[in-house]
Image: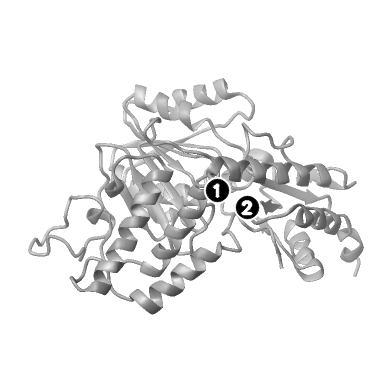
Amino acid sequence: MIYFDNGATTFPKPRSVVNAVNYAITQIGANPGRGGHKMAMKASEVLYDCRKNAAELFDIDNPENVIITNNCTTALNTVIKGILKSGDHAVISSYEHNAVVRPLEYLKTKGVDYSVAEIEFGDTEKTIDNFRNSFKENTKLVICTHASNVFGVRLPIERIAALCRLNGILFCTDAAQTAGIIPISMKNSDIDFLCTAGHKGLYGPMGTGLLIINSEVIPESLTQGGTGSLSAQINQPEILPDKFESGTHNLLGIAGLNEGIKYVLNKTPQKIFDYEIKLAQNLYDGLRKIKNIELYTPKPDEKQFVPVISFNLKDTDSERTAQILSDRFNIAVRAGLHCAPLAHKCFGTLEKGTVRAVISSFSTQNEVNYLVKSVSQINYYKRM
């Protein structure tokens, strides 16, 4: 299958990732931090190596501040529910994923309020003003996606994070669509919490994610239990990363994630981005030549976008378009709302959703050409 559903999860994975998962289950097999025997020690080495490589990728000094999670949603929930208490106020962008919106809607029942700052595409100053004007005396946290998972628009998170720091407000970014693609330095930014998936631009297996803490303010943990450390204490350890990593680790996923991160480090995020954005630009150019195409943003450039293209065919439901591409052309794209109704509301696509094609480092120009050709032929297959 020609795969363009990389915004949901990247495929294929590097061979080193597959090999690492296989090695972990056949040759290691032990529980990290739960024993002193050789297999347990090897498992702990894999876990630490993953933290160390993630710390290098995101430019943070202490690997212990790299928390391994089940996914980006768990990381976001940890920050949102671990920071906000009754009487607090939060601000989010108008492009946020339900992984941000739904926890905040839940917290509204617990006395937490939040506001939505509108993103003004192409007008950074207006966007910053919208965030500034959303602040209240009790604003404690701003959560902002680094780039829209639907339309690929990058947000000025460095400016927003600096504004938050100036106002004594914590800043959290959802980097699910940018980690491994856009260079991110925690050391040289005002980002307090970075949340991301391990299985997208980091090329790890599903069931992996990261929370990177760059703040002296530490969230409360969502779960408590065995950590393999300080076992004589009946209270949850406060040290990092133990505070957030109760229970048995997903060693198979972590082994794969470690190799995915090493793959990105070796190629570098910048080179990956340069390759992918060029293919996205070529895809955009090809699609806009199709007579009945609907595109929702300008051609993606290197400063304002990540390699995500959303489109529709006029008078055709997005789900129908995706189904034809799958059934007739063996192409995988995603259709619908992509768990981000706020972003669709901004772009006027809430009723019908969009067809989303996302590039990865394994995508090729031939595949892009084939997708364009296939979309141009859909009207014929609609009548069948």
Relative image position of residue 312 (x, y in whole percent): 77, 50
Rendering quarter of residue 297: top right
Identify the residue shown where x is 38% and y is 27%: 164
Rendering quarter of residue 187: top left
Residue named by callout 2: 361
Residue named by callout 1: 267
The quarter of the rendered structure image containing the N terminus is: bottom right
Please report whichever mark, 1 or 2, sits nearer to the chain's N-terminal start: 1
Q: Residues within 10 Å of mark 2 (few under 14, many from 20)?
A: many
Evaluate whether residue 377 shows in this view: yes
Foreground residue among 164 and 317: 164
Identify the residue shown where x is 59% and y is 42%: 271
Q: Amino acid at mark 2?
A: Ser
Relative image position of residue 211 (x, y in whole percent): 37, 49
The quarter of the rendered structure image containing the C terminus is: bottom right
Q: How many marks?
A: 2
Evaluate whether residue 295 shows in this view: no
Foreground residue among 108 and 301: 301
Q: Residues within 10 Å of mark 1 (few under 14, many from 20)?
A: few
